[in-house]
Image (cartoon, rainbow, N blue to C red):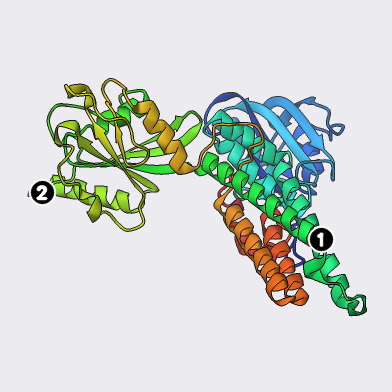
């Protein structure tokens, strides 16, 4: 699974595996070849593997510090693939700290962030997609994201990658066999099997790309900025989307002077909604700073809702002054104040809503889901990251280059090489070809005890 350049550690690590604070139960986790020695010193004996054993926990000088349960997992039948000891004690910060320091006194060292999961990866207990899914499951902010993370953790994502790699390998072997035996005079362009394999590969790539993009949306969501002049109802719209009073709303223009961020879920769709100060001409230093922050938020947005008032819908919009490349939707608010029935929402051109009454909000939510490319169908979703999508895109590009070389130039050698590069890109996802730098970036974001 891993490169020969990756090294395995032989020291023993320890960390608290439960969240900081007070609780009924806290867990200290130990992994490494000193786990059995630490179990005997702290708990009086090495318990049978996978058997919960009651014990009095003692420090390095034999003084009792807690009572609880020991669990011992002998290598390789453990999460990390090493000997693992879990000490289940009372979940207060002091007894947990005393247990950790006792383990350190007996030869362990404090674990780095994500080091338990990293050892599981290095010992071929999990692949990189499963390791990342552990972190994503812990950090999941919705039921849909949690279920998708569990699917990836169970190996569904890696299975999809393996199916694609197998298909690439079989096509590559077929092409290379024809190259090695030119006397067979195989005409690639006339060979229906090659064409069928290429078509099948393209379908696998497209399906995986779609599912990975949905998984990335579940994990990261979209940054949505509410922008526009003062008193058009940006904060009211934020409150309507949130379902509670996240922002102060008054009739006085310019209530919002700073950016306000709220993480929301709309039908399982994750959004970070940013309410900004109204953009207008002002000599007030506080308002000018608020507008500067608003423009900065707009520059980093995935999508911008530019709001206007139904009473001033024909006023010139400042959308032409927005940064290039930022997707924009115009939203006309306060339709509840208009005596005339506003025109129906015309696709993506302009949406009419009332943040106060809720009219048009469902259409706005549907529009946001559409611009995100989000589907509310839960079955089959996987959790994914931007690096996964980039790797799949690069692999697909290599496969397409090989296909074009074959069809346009009958260059089987080029196709074989492009297929090899495509396999290598997919290997980056599961960790088959992975640099130490990438592993450091991934596991450093984990919590200490995981």
Q: Secondary structure at mark 2?
A: loop
Q: Residue at x 69, y 29 (%)?
A: 88
Q: Is residue 363 above or below residue 294?
A: above
Q: Nearer the viewer, residue 307 or 121?
A: 307
The residue labelled by disc 1 is 192
Please state if 119 lies on the left or on the right of 277 as rendered: right
The residue labelled by disc 2 is 281
Q: Secondary structure at mark 1?
A: helix
Please state if 223 lies on the left or on the right of 396 as rendered: left
* Count of numbered badges drawn on the protein: 2
Quarter that holds the N terminus = bottom right
Residue 73 can be seen, yes or no: yes
Callout in the foreground (2, 1) = 1
Q: Nearer the viewer, residue 273 or 106?
A: 273
Going from the N terminus, do you reach mark 2 or mark 1 first? 1
Identity of the residue furthest to the bottom in this view: 183
Examine the image and state in which quarter residue 358 appears: top left
Q: Position of residue 28 (x, y in %)?
A: 67, 36
Please state if 337 lies on the left or on the right of 9 as rendered: left
Please state if 372 lies on the left or on the right of 80 as rendered: left
Q: Nearer the viewer, residue 227 or 52?
A: 227
Q: Position of residue 228 (x, y in %)?
A: 22, 42
Residue 101 can be seen, yes or no: no
Binning the other alpha carbons within 10 Å of mark 1 as few (below 14), some (14 to 19) or many (20 upward) gives few
Quarter that holds the C terminus = top right
Binning the other alpha carbons within 10 Å of mark 2 as few (below 14), some (14 to 19) or many (20 upward) gives few
Q: Position of residue 430 (x, y in %)?
A: 70, 53
Examine the image and state in which quarter residue 232 appears: top left
The circle drawn on residue 383 is: none
Circle 2/circle 1 CB separation < 8 Å: no
Q: Residue at x 80, y 49 (%)?
A: 33
């Amino acid at each position: 699974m891993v490169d020969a350049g990756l090294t395995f550690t032989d020291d023993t690590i320890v960390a608290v595996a439960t969240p900081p604070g007070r609780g009924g139960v806290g867990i200290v986790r130990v992994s490494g070849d000193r786990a059995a020695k630490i179990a005997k010193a702290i708990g009086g004996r090495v318990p049978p593997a996978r058997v919960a054993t009651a014990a009095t926990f003692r420090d390095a000088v034999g003084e009792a510090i807690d009572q609880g349960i020991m669990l011992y997992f002998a290598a390789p039948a453990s999460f990390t693939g090493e000997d693992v000891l879990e000490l289940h004690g009372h979940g207060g910060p002091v007894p947990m700290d005393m247990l950790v320091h006792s383990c350190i006194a007996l030869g362990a060292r404090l674990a780095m962030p994500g080091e338990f999961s990293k050892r599981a990866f290095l010992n071929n207990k999990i692949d990189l997609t499963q390791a990342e899914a552990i972190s994503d499951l812990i950090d999941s902010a919705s039921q849909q994201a949690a279920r998708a993370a569990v699917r990836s953790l169970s190996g569904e994502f890696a299975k999809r990658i393996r199916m694609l790699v197998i298909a690439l390998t079989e096509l590559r072997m077929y092409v290379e066999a024809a190259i090695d035996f030119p006397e067979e005079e195989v005409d690639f362009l006339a060979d229906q099997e090659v064409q069928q394999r290429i078509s099948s590969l393209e379908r696998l790539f497209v399906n995986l790309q779609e599912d990975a993009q949905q998984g990335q949306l579940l994990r990261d969501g979209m940054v949505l900025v509410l922008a526009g002049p003062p008193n058009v109802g940006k904060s009211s719209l934020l409150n309507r989307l949130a379902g509670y009073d996240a922002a102060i709303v008054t009739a006085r223009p310019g209530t919002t002077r700073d950016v306000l961020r709220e993480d929301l879920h709309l039908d399982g769709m994750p959004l970070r909604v940013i309410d900004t100060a109204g953009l207008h001409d002002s000599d007030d230093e506080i308002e000018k700073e608020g507008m500067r922050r608003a423009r900065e938020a707009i520059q980093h947005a995935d999508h911008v809702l530019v709001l206007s008032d139904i009473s001033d819908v024909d006023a010139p919009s400042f959308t032409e002054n927005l940064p290039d490349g930022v997707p924009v939707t115009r939203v006309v608010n306060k339709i509840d104040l208009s005596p005339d029935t506003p025109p129906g929402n015309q696709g993506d051109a302009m949406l009419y809503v009332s943040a106060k009454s809720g009219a048009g909000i469902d259409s706005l939510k549907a529009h946001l889901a559409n611009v995100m490319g989000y589907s509310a169908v839960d079955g089959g979703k996987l959790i994914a990251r931007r690096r996964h999508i980039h790797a799949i895109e690069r692999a697909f590009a290599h496969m397409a280059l090989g296909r074009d070389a074959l069809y346009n130039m009958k260059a089987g050698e080029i196709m074989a090489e492009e297929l090899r590069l495509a396999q290598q890109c997919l290997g980056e996802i599961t960790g088959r070809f992975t640099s130490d730098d990438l592993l450091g970036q991934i596991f450093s974001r984990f919590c200490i005890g995981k």
